[in-house]
Image: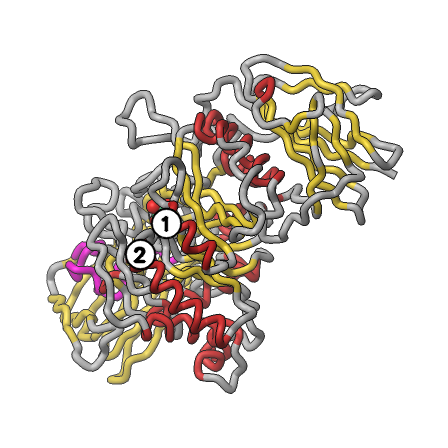
Amino acid sequence: ITVQVSKPQAVVQPTMWGIFFEDINFSADGGLYAELVKNRSFEFTQPLMGWKQADKKGKILIVNRADNKANPRYAHITGEVGLVNEGFRGMGLTQNEQYNFSIWARGNAGVNVALVNEKGEDIGHGSIAVAGNEWKKYTVSLTAVQTVAKGALKVSFSGEADVDMISLFPANTWKQRPGGLRADLVQLLADLHPGFVRFPGGCIVEGRDLANRYQWKNTVGKVEDRTQIVNRWNTEFSHRAPGDYFQSYGLGFFEYFQLAEDIGASPLPILNCGMACQYNTGEVAEDVDSYIQDALDLIEFANGTVDTRWGKLRTDMGHPAPFNLKMMGVGNEQWDSQYVSRYKLFEKALKGKHPEIRLVSSVGPSPDGDRFDYLWSEMKAAHADLVDEHYYMSPDWFLQNARRYDNYDRNAPKIFAGEYAAHVKDKEKDGAETRNTWGSALAEAAFMTGLERNADVVQMASYAPLLAHVDAWQWRPDLIWFDNLRSVGTPNYYVQKLFANNRGVQTVPVLSNGHTLAGEDSLYASATIDPAKRLVFLKVVNASGKPLTYTIRPEGPKGYRIASQQVLTATDKGDFNTLDNPGVVKPVELKKAGDKKGKVVLAPNSLNLFVMSYS
Ligand code: AHR
């Protein structure tokens, strides 16, 4: 294997390997957003969904107030009332950890608050006294004396009061932010060192119909003023989200921008262009202007000064500095002619006012055939900045497409591989159910060598979906799985991590017998260099079931040394990681990385990272 170190080709963009976050599989409420109370504001279609009345001596009445459109409902309590919240498939509570309870209330009532275990036993409690006719926020901290995966919260009232926004957060959130994000999950994302975060979807952006679309303005400002809606992935026909999947928007656009900033990634918000999800209603709004205005206002929210309306809101929310927004997506998986005309209107307005913002447009999955040719030629003619391709295909497709961009027109729009995952049919279940097996991750790794080799045109890529709760998912495979206490990276996660953490700065050719390695002898390879650090990052996939011995020959500068060889492999291509067995497929660093002459062994079905130094 020859690595032509002195022939740098393309610059690898800092955005090359990123993440795509969508609130699917309980990724936000019940996942990344650390709120433990489900339906804290009684706004679900059935107002007491998630709540059980434990003590029925008193009465509870749900009141609808006309003067608060964002948060219309609250509960009026009379007498002795006990309410138990079940959380999102239970509440994960950890021994000796502190939990912060809060409630908005007015009236006169004593409130006892208890964390309870699966048997309903008190494992941590506190109390507050509500007094006064004005709405006020009351807080108390509790410490759990036991660890439970499926605990609950019991709130017992005695007196008469109006109550709303009943909330419980672990104190130990990411960066200890009150009302913040789940630390273990953000850490897994941070460890990827992603170049960008695409948010908030996906189909969530579009909604089943336009009323159900994602409207960023409803997701900023005080949490109690954010208008929640039913989640587009709330599937009445699925036992995993039987009607109880809503979006509280506690994780809203401010938090997404902040998350991206925290983990050193560029934010990539996707906006609705006035079209609902084509797989559902496909509703199209006649008015485009208000959608364009939302996009312009978002740029102001992210980058504007305190003197602007939306820049002021960002400042008031605690972030006076701009979020450094540089790109924005227009629509998700919108593929027909109406999309093209809308995209052009967006482009005209946005480029007119903000030429500094790069636009990402939808071009469809385009795996095969000519279904999307029309869209591709329109985007090419429009000189679109970046086109977003999605591919959920078989592992074979990923292997066969390692050369996908080798002959791509270098004058055409740059590529964003915005959603991809190899889908392996599950043996026990029907074809739609797939798992994060090593075989799927290996195929993605082979494909990613092709993306990296073509970094002059492929400037961004992200696996999809990102997160899934083991008891509440609608779609798999997913990059990271979690329950109420634990989280686990899949083999696919480790593939992403290996590429993203060893991105390099420029690509260099990798040849064997004068040919690019993209399937020959079942090998797939790509390499990048970091000239300032004098490092080479060579990624080699052996997709065959046998060990292969090769000699790595760097060409160019002298004094090469293979500093390390990391191997990602498994006993079987069907292996996958679980919460109980998280280390089945994990990268291993070999004690000895090749011999003095650069002879290396590539294990069967393996991804190998060689880091080489030179003088
Ligand atoms: O990632 C899940 C879904 O797949 C996304 O919402 C959508 O863009 C795609 O169809």
201 relative to 532 in the view: left or right: left
109 vs 439, nearest the viewer = 439
- Region in magenta: 35-53
Question: In the image, residue 353 lies at what x, y percent?
Answer: 49, 76
Q: The N terminus lies in which quarter of the figure?
A: top right
441 vs 92, nearest the viewer = 441
- Would you say residue 389 is visible in this rendering? yes
Tell me the kind of residue under disc 2. Ser
Question: In the image, residue 93 lies at what x, y percent?
Answer: 40, 49
Question: Is 351 drawn above or below residue 559 in the view shown?
Answer: below
Mark 2 burial class by Cα count in 10 Å: few <14, some 14-19, many 20+: few
Q: What secondary structure is found at the residue carrying circle 1?
A: helix
| Separation of residues labelled 2 and 1 (CA atoms) | 9 Å
Q: What secondary structure is found at the residue carrying circle 2?
A: helix
255 vs 195, nearest the viewer = 195
Ligand 1 neighbours mark 2 (CB distance < 8 Å): no
122 vs 439, nearest the viewer = 439
Q: The C terminus lies in which quarter of the figure?
A: top right
Label 2 close to label 1 by CB (< 8 Å): yes
Q: Residue at x 47, y 54 (%)?
A: 380
Question: In the image, residue 251 lies at what x, y percent?
Answer: 40, 61
Q: Which mark is residue 444?
A: none
Mark 1 burial class by Cα count in 10 Å: few <14, some 14-19, many 20+: some
Q: Residue at x 56, y 40 (%)?
A: 451
Residue indicated by mark 2: 337
Residue indicated by mark 1: 374
**Most common SS among magenta residues:** loop
Question: Is 596 drawn above or below residue 402 in the view shown?
Answer: above
Q: Residue at x 42, y 65 (%)?
A: 253
